[in-house]
Image (tube, helix red, strand yellow):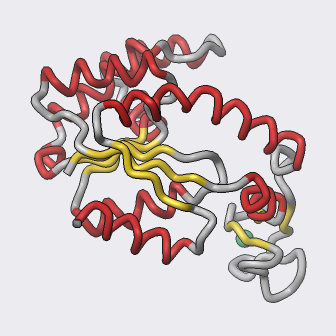
């Protein structure tokens, strides 16, 4: 099965991506991970990407689509299908992605779109606390540490990321909604869109997603 996963920050996209790919045995395509991997292995594509990253610029769309194509062509796991997460972020990217996927005879089958209300996202993200030492993530209400402000795993100090504040989150949501609207419309027109209510608990969203994909 070949899936594109869309959703705003705080909708639980990462958790759902892991659950789906494990359940269906799919290759997880995260453009951030692919970039890091190629740069680490110093491949020709990685070297090309490095030049942009090191000069503080963005890696151009055209290079990102080539990285994805390269991954799909060379990773044997791609034959069972893939789950794409964090890409496309614009309509142009969605169209470019379609082109390479048609070339590879691996067109997108479903687009899962997580929808969450701003209230729920604010509650999730403003309550998030991260360990300074080991990076473990907690939530003041949903997943508190045993001792307030202290990491259960390593005893490190917990802090709130500066971008986990109401104004920043609200703005990120706005940007996400505006840039994603045309992508949603694009996949909807193709009859590939499945919308999921991500205000629910992670477990429930996962079950709903699998039911939708298998049904
Ligand atoms: Zn820790």
Number of numbered markers: 0
* Quadrant position of residue 40: top left
State whether residue 21 is above or below residue 61. Answer: below
Task: Identify the residue shown where x is 25% and y is 33%.
Answer: 71
Residue 175 percent coordinates (x, y)? 70, 30
The C terminus lies in quadrant: bottom left
Q: Nearer the viewer, residue 209 or 18?
A: 209
Which corner quadrant of the figure contains ligand 1?
bottom right
Depth check: give the residue in front, 130 or 212. Answer: 212
Above or below, comparing residue 60 to residue 132 in the picture: above
| Residue at screen point 45% across, 30% down | 185
Residue 170 falls left or right of residue 89: right
Residue drawn at x 26%, y 50% is 27
Residue situated furthest bottom in the rendering: 146
Q: Which image quadrant is residue 190 in?
A: top left
- 175 above or below 80? above
Question: What residue is at 40 percent from the left and 21 percent from the top?
Answer: 64
The percent position of residue 38, horizontal first and vertical second, equals 37, 30
Q: In the drawing, does residue 110 fall left or right of residue 156?
A: left
In percent of width and height, residue 43 lies at: 31, 23
Residue 126 in the image: above or below residue 170? below
x%, y% of residue 74?
16, 34
Left or right relative to 127: residue 42: left
């Amino acid at each position: 099965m070949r899936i594109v996963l869309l959703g705003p920050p705080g909708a639980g996209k990462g958790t759902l991506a892991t659950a789906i790919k494990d359940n269906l045995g799919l290759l997880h395509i995260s453009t951030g991970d692919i970039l890091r991997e190629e740069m680490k292995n110093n491949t020709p594509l990685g070297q090309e990407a490095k030049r942009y990253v090191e000069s503080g610029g963005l890696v151009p769309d055209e290079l990102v689509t080539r990285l994805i194509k390269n991954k799909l062509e060379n990773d044997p796991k791609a034959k069972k299908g893939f789950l794409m997460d964090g890409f496309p972020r614009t309509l142009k990217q969605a169209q470019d992605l379609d082109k390479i996927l048609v070339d590879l005879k691996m067109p997108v089958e479903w687009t899962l779109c997580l929808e969450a209300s701003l209230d729920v996202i604010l509650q999730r993200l403003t309550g998030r606390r991260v360990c300074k030492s080991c990076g473990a993530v907690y939530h003041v209400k949903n997943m508190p540490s045993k001792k307030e402000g202290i990491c259960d795993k390593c005893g490190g100090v917990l802090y709130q990321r500066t971008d986990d504040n109401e104004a920043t989150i609200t703005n990120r949501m706005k940007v996400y909604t505006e840039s994603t609207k045309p992508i949603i419309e694009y996949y909807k027109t193709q009859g590939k869109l499945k919308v999921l209510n991500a205000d629910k608990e992670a477990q429930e969203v996962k079950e709903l997603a699998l039911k939708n994909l298998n049904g």
